[in-house]
Image: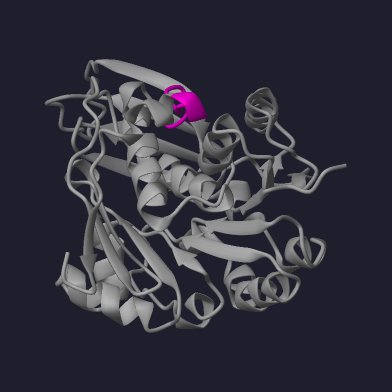
Amino acid sequence: MSELDLLVVGDVNPDVIVTALGVQPEFGQVEQLVDSASLVMGGSAAITAAGAARLGLRVGLCGVVGDDDLGQLMMVRLTETGVDLRHLRVDAYTPTGMSVILNRGDDRAVLTASGTISALSPDDLDALPDRPARHVHAASYYLMSDAFRDVLPAAFGRFRSAGATTSLDTNWDPHERWDLSALLAETDVFLPNEAELTAIGRSPILDRAIEVVSENGCDVAVKRGPQGAVAQIAGQRLRVLRTPPVDFVDAVGAGDSFDAGFLTGRLLGRDPGQCLAMAVIAGTLSTASTGGTDSQPTADEVELWMSSVKVDDLGGGPA
């Protein structure tokens, strides 16, 4: 069996996306009509894995689903995308996690029932080989259990000692503690959005937050939605200001598709500017459908936009 290019570790769960433009939920058993509702593949890890597989990488997924209909749905959908599930565990005693997303176009509220999302354990990490893939990416760090988070830095260190590289996308910290330094010290690439980065960097100023986080020795690529992205890679500051035009539907999972684009570029040996352009293109094109995976692009679709997405080289200057 050939070596995986990428192993993604983290959350595997469906999303229920409710599009309700102009609707404010009301208690008191008030029933309201919404524009649409969809059951789609969710979980930051699952969406990233699916996106990277669609871009042509050999991708595996380490996560947990329940022994229920939702868990079966996720396994079927992931298998259809070509993701290797040898490290996916089925938990017979815990229901598959789920997120309900109230989408208002440019903003959303998320309610998550953790279920198997937080069931990843130190034993799951211990069961992985020292080099489970050329690169290991961890997603939704703050939704994992305390025990899992405690041992993830050592696991990243083990993978790196065996020649793998590592990356991290935390997503939002529900407790807003933002404690991450031990893990960043074992991380090659950190992939937050701007709000997450400024919280972790303890500064509302983007450039300062990038500098603070980069002091841990990791590269940083920051998602900025319609404003593109900024990155600091090996001391080089890069910026993309314009994104490809798209008939926008929602941004659910766009950050995960960004991760898939960036990591694909890196694993294909593309230069840092091309990696950032691929990330922005993949994230932007994914917003053309409801949910995170239906509009994820192929490698050919990304390449069509590469010459149109300008990457500014800022040297060591501000974003």
Q: Position of residue 97 (x, y in %)?
A: 56, 43
Report the residue at 53% width, 45% height from top: 264
Query: Count the marks: how many?
Result: 0
Instruction: Judge from the rendering whether residue 293 lies leftward or rightward of residue 159; answer left or right.
Output: left
Q: Work out which quarter of the rendered image holds the N terminus and state it.
A: top right
Write down the quadrant of residue 66 in the picture.
Answer: top right
Residue lying at 57% horizontally and 57% vertically, measured from the top left: 137
Q: Residue furthest right?
A: 1
| Residue 89, percent from left and from top | 76, 46
- Residue 289 at x, y = what percent? 36, 21
Q: Quadrant of residue 85?
A: top right
Q: Can residue 40 be seen at all in this image of the molecule?
A: no
Where is 20 relative to 154, above or below? above
In which quadrant will I find the C terminus? bottom left
| Residue in view at x 23 percent, y 37 percent | 243
Question: Which residue corresponds to the image point at 31% horizontal and 16% vertical from the top-left?
Answer: 36
Query: Which residue is the extreme one toward the left?
Result: 22
- Residue 196 horizontal side relative to residue 137, left or right: left
Q: Using residue 174 as the reference point, say whether residue 122 is left or right of it.
A: right
> Where does the magenta region start and end?
291-300
Residue 96, above or below 194: above
Q: Is residue 293 magenta?
A: yes
User: Is residue 269 shown left or right of residue 135?
Assistant: left
Magenta span includes 197 = no
Asked if 288 appears above or below 15 in the picture, the reply is: above
Note whether 197 is above or below 65 in the view shown. below
